[in-house]
Image (cartoon, grey):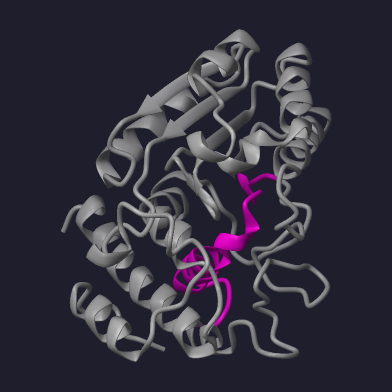
């Protein structure tokens, strides 16, 4: 079985995890989580160079920062399926005293989580700091970050984008989940941003645009190309055109499932579209 085929099996199971997690507690954010399942699976299973075990410093390995922390279900699922913590712990999502809160936190010491996130617009700044720390420590590994397109409406991002290119933070690969949707509607309805690609280029970043943002092969090719472009004096941005709610027909092509859990009947329908591949928790 090829790596991509194996990863596709993981993607299908991750979708099931997401759906079951938010359904159980009737809260959470399935739309963006489903839309980024392929990205997370590819990043953690095919791209990043990772050590055995987990430490907060991430020395001598690639590190990842999630800025749009509300899509924690996909992050938790992929971390668990990658072996960072027991898969059965997904059953505690959003429960009182759980390590798997609605937005990732660090105070409970969940392996794989290096920053609390969910206050949008801050993740890129943290990733830049981590990337500069790697340079100071002569650590040749890469820092990856994921942002939502809606959070680019917040100003701190653009200060960070300007800083990264000015300081030649070229061991950083930042991906934008460019699904065109946010909690109140489309990004164009809420606050049009014009050409995101043009803006990043104007700030002197290298930019790759992936039209098929839910295709594992296309994602892998883009991440590998971005890695090959690193170390040349410029940070790299990947614009990933995804579909919110991908893999569940009634959740796609709408912003309605940004932060809404499926009921029993909807869960049954969604799971039927994504047959079990690796075993539910």
Determine the residue located farthest toward the left in the rendered image: 1
Task: Quarter of the image for the N terminus: give it.
Answer: bottom left
Q: Nearer the viewer, residue 128 or 229?
A: 128
On whether residue 62 falls in the magenta region, the answer is yes
Question: In the image, which residues are magenta?
Answer: 60-86
Q: Nearer the viewer, residue 204 or 79?
A: 204
Q: Is residue 167 left or right of residue 72?
A: right
Above or below, comparing residue 40 to residue 219 in the picture = below
Q: Residue at x 37, y 37 (%)?
A: 241
On whether residue 88 falls in the magenta region, the answer is no
> Picture coordinates of residue 126 (x, y %)?
77, 42
Above or below, comparing residue 13 to residue 178 in the picture = below
> Picture coordinates of residue 151 (x, y %)?
64, 42
Q: Residue at x 39, y 77 (%)?
A: 19
Q: Nearer the viewer, residue 161 or 127?
A: 161
Above or below, comparing residue 66 to residue 235 in the picture = below
Total label count? 0
Determine the residue located farthest toward the front in the rendered image: 189
Q: Is residue 215 left or right of residue 105?
A: left
Q: Residue at x 35, y 86 (%)?
A: 280
Q: Is residue 276 visible?
A: no
Q: Is residue 163 visible?
A: yes
> Picture coordinates of residue 105 (x, y %)?
75, 68
Q: Nearer the viewer, residue 175 or 222?
A: 175
Above or below, comparing residue 17 to residue 24 in the picture = above
Q: Residue at x 22, y 80 (%)?
A: 269
> Picture coordinates of residue 275 (x, y %)?
20, 78
Task: Quarter of the image for the C terminus: give it.
Answer: bottom left
């Amino acid at each position: 079985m090829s790596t991509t085929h194996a990863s596709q099996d993981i993607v299908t199971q991750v979708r099931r995890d997401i759906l079951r997690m938010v359904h159980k507690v009737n809260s959470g954010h399935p739309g963006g989580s489903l839309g980024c399942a392929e990205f997370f699976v590819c990043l953690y299973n095919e791209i990043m160079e990772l050590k055995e075990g987990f430490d907060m410093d991430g020395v001598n390995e690639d590190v990842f920062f999630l800025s749009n922390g509300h899509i924690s279900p996909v992050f938790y699922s992929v971390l668990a399926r990658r072996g960072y913590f027991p898969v059965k712990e997904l059953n505690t999502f959003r429960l009182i005293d759980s390590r798997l809160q609605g937005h990732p936190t660090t105070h409970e010491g969940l392996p794989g989580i290096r920053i609390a996130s969910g206050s949008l617009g801050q993740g890129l700044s943290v990733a830049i700091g981590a990337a500069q720390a790697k340079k100071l420590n002569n650590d040749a590994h890469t820092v990856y970050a994921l942002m939502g397109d809606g959070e680019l409406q917040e100003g701190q991002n653009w200060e960070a984008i300007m800083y990264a290119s000015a300081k030649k933070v070229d061991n950083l690969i930042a991906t934008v989940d460019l699904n065109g949707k946010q909690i109140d509607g489309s990004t164009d309805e809420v606050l049009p941003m014009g050409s995101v690609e043009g803006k990043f280029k104007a700030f002197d970043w290298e930019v790759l645009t992936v039209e098929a943002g839910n295709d594992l092969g296309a994602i892998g090719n883009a991440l590998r190309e971005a890695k090959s472009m690193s170390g040349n004096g410029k940070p790299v941005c990947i614009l990933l055109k995804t579909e919110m709610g991908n893999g569940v027909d009634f959740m796609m092509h709408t912003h309605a499932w940004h932060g809404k859990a499926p009921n029993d009947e909807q869960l049954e329908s969604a799971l039927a579209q994504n047959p079990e591949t690796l075993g539910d928790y």
